Amino acid sequence: MKKLKNIITACCILVMAVVIYSCTSDTEYLKYTEGGEISYTAAIDSLEIFSGQNRVRLEGLIIGDPKVTEARVYWNNNSDSISIPVSRTGNVDAVSQIIDGLDESIYNFVVKTFDAEGNSSIPVSQTAEVFGDRYIASLFNRPLISNILVGNELVINFAEMDLNSGVVGSEVQYTNTSDELVTVFVNITEPSLTITDFKEASSYQYRTAFVPVETAIDNFFTALEEVKPVPTPVLQNAAVPFVAAESSGRWGTLAAPWITNDAAKTHDGLGGWDEWNGNVFNLESGWGAPHFTDGKIYQVVNAEPATFYLKVEVLGTNHASNADGAYFVITKGDGIPNTADVETAPEVLGYKKIAGAGSYTVEFTVDETTDISVGQVSTQNGDHFCNITSWEIIVAN
């Protein structure tokens, strides 16, 4: 009996403890609500912050809650903020806002929504990097391979770049033949740009665009760089099939603007044009034709100050055995020197002695705008030939 009384006493004590605890728990929250319920607004949904140049763009959604009237964005540990009015028009409304005037740095942006009563949502945060002068200083212009200017047609050839650098392309600004400023964007995947209406004696400017991250809202540009293309001195009638001014059978004399002296006309008053091998340039002696001294074939073009390359393609020749010498030569002015003077004449800008078949490249520099003469001179006391398929001048860049 005494044991049963003890059990009943213990149960009573336990029930009283539960009742006391329950009463305490039911009223504990009041010290946080100060006697009332907390009302939250709907938090911004799908928050994204897009990087830019000293700015960002914030985007997000307000879903469901019709009471939301405002979104506030905080950064720099809440020391800076902006308010974005929200007009509810449906179940889902978009919020978009540019925040500019930002220093180059990494920011943590915190967004809260509010209703007209001042009730707020739980905060939603997103980190974004803002780019500026430091990033721009690390960029460099897309390198150029060459500028090929012939008349009013300009071809700009670009070098490749590492696509992981964020490079997008280059912006080219030029003046056309109507004196209009034209801007063209060249995608990084394009190796060249052809301009057909480039104003004579003008220059162009270009700069290269980058994005630091794929979702950036701004392109970042290098400084503009000015380029003045050098016109290419164009040799005429300079590749197979060469054109003859007159011919008889296999032999002929090259048509203008080639100038052929009398010493080179070894085939009954003709010489330099050969019907064989597809109408080549060929200054030939022997095999029944006379030998000659200082046979010359050249043409005159105008060149501006620059460094150039003369490229000559030789299909076949036996001048390696010519003790008297044969040369490709470039001189300042009208005319080319005699064979013996090529290597010492002051007017010679560049030369190459002819030996075997292949490609010949002669580098030369013009220091002022002037006429230059380009051609072949040789003395041939034997059976000698030189089949040439093309002549070309290229501007060195």
Image (cartoon, rainbow, N blue to C red):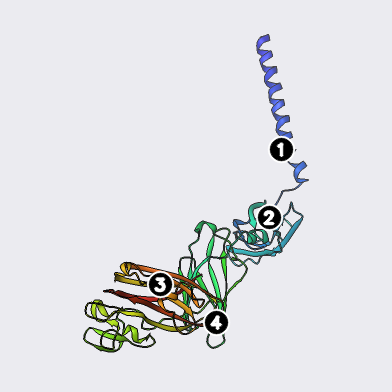
Residue holding disc 3: 311
Q: Which mark is drawn over residue 369?
A: 4
Q: Which mark is drawn over residue 205?
A: none
Of the two numbered discs 3 and 1 in the rendering, the one whose residue sits closer to the viewer:
3
- Placement of 349 over or under 79, stated as above or below: below
Q: In the rendered structure, which amino acid carries the disc numbered 2?
A: Ser
Neighbour class for label 2 at 10 Å: few (<14), some, many (≥20)?
few
User: Which of the 4 image quarters holds residue 277?
Assistant: bottom left
- Placement of 318 over or under 374, stated as above or below: above
Residue found farthest to the top: 2
Q: Is mark 2 on a helix, strand or loop?
A: strand
Residue holding disc 2: 105
Q: In the rendered structure, which amino acid carries the disc numbered 1?
A: Asp
User: Which of the 4 image quarters holds residue 26?
Assistant: top right
Labels 2 and 1: the sequence-earlier one: 1
Label 4, label 2: how far apart the Cα atoms are:
52 Å
Q: In which quarter of the image is the N terminus?
A: top right
Neighbour class for label 3 at 10 Å: few (<14), some, many (≥20)?
some
Labels 2 and 3: the sequence-earlier one: 2
Q: Which mark is drawn over residue 26?
A: 1
Q: What element carries label 4?
A: loop
Of the two numbered discs 2 and 1 in the rendering, the one whose residue sits closer to the viewer:
2
Label 3, label 4: how far apart the Cα atoms are:
21 Å
| Residue 357 place in picture, x, y as percent | 31, 68
Residue 321 seen by the camera: yes
Q: What element carries label 3?
A: strand
- Left or right for 81, reference 232: right
